[in-house]
Image (spheres, rainbow, N blue to C red):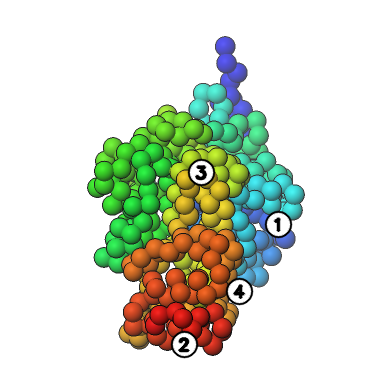
Amino acid sequence: MLPDFYAEYKKKLCTPEEAVQVVKSGDWVDYTSTLGKPVLLDRALAKRRDELHDVKIRGNLLSGPIMAVECDDTQEHFVYHSWHCSSYERRLSDKGLCYYIPMVFHHNADYYEFFLNVNVCMVSVSPMDRHGYFHFSVNTGVAAPIARVADVVIVEVNEHLPKVRGGYDECIHISQVDHVVEGEHEAFPEVISPEPTETDRRIAQHILPYIVDGATLQLGIGSTPTAVGEIIAQSDLQDLGMHTELCSDAYLSMYLAGKLTNARKKIDPGKGVFGCAVGSHDLYDWLDDNPGILAYPLEYVNRPGVIAEIDNMVSINSCVSVDLYGQVAAESSGSRHLSGTGGQLDFLIGASASRGGKAFICMPSIYVDSEGSTHSRIMPQFNGDIITSPRSQIYFLATEYGVINLEGRSTWERAEGIISIAHPAFRDKLIREAEERKIWRRSNKR
């Protein structure tokens, strides 16, 4: 006969208002990531604003609102930090209400194990099973290492969270929990990727010939990776695999088209692997109790050594801009914070080392500002932008004008290649800038 885990559950069950009494002034509180945001606990904590000071909260790709932030624009009571900004967290950053934590995702567990304090972990989980386990669901990528080091662990049972199977650290047992909170939740808002533009589709078409049958894909956030998934779903490619930090609806599209089988993977054969997931209700339904999908901590998913062991690993990520030296900015525009390093470096290194692997950084060649002026995303040289990926790590760059390979290329070869995929209206100016920096050969064609 199994132990009566529900008796222990009832002993630890309390209201959100009772649970947040454990938070003290000066504490570090973690809200974990994505759908792991503890909605009821956050609301209860915000009500304690006037009796608390300097409570520091960490999160990652959280949707709004975060009530503890919204209730205190002075930041005297609550201060919010993010590992990787969602669109909502980006708006908080614009208001000075969110501070980014520089990081690379495969070190996420190490940060907590060796360097960070967690006084209280608050995390949403799926309902407890008969064995006494709560699943971290689409939050598996980051949740367990945080809960493991926390002084106090509070789980908020969310009836809408899918139960996602995992490789390890996908769940937490009732014996490891201090308090359990229940309550009604609204259905999760659907996070739909931007509709790919014609430019996105042209970039995706340039990348498609580099992908072979049996390749394993990592697709980042943004409309260009979404376009790649859309075009692959309509292609003749077969037996593709999934090994990705973020699972999105692009993978569901490939699965429904019969392209995503994971059949040729030598690591986790037959299984699609991910760390976190954000998308539609259909995506969450697909992930729910699906034996063909495994969630892992990011220390595994994003470890370059693991990625390198996957044959024909193809990584496709976006960026904001590139300079003539091949440096990539993917998290800021000037001093304005937009996103985070995330797993871009992890997959650049891992996919480049994979047998037959390829790592792509993609962007449209131009953008139009709020005043209607057109600017090149290829810059002469960065001055103030945050460098996400150094020039020494860049493999393939892609715009709507083509794909270039920068591995082993000299400064003049890089400048020549990068200018060749710039918008034609800016190429002559970029050539003059390259000449001033002495990275343009006189024999190069204008």
Quadrant location of the C terminus in the rendered image: bottom left
Circle 3 packing at 10 Å, graded few (<14), some (14-19), many (20+), is few
The span from disc 1 to disc 3 (Cα, nearest Å) is 46 Å
Q: Which mark is residue 432?
A: 2
Q: Which mark is residue 316?
A: none
Residue 438 locus on image (x, y percent)? 56, 83
Tell me what residue is drawn at x 65 percent, y 34 percent: 176
Mark 4 residue type: Thr
Q: Which residue is mark 1?
A: 27
Q: Which residue is mark 4?
A: 74
Quadrant location of the N terminus in the rendered image: top right
Residue 11 against residue 255 in the figure, above or below: above
198 vs 53, nearest the viewer = 198
Among numbered discs 3 and 2, the one appearing first in the sequence: 3
The span from disc 3 to disc 2 (Cα, nearest Å) is 38 Å
Q: SS of the residue at dot 2?
A: helix
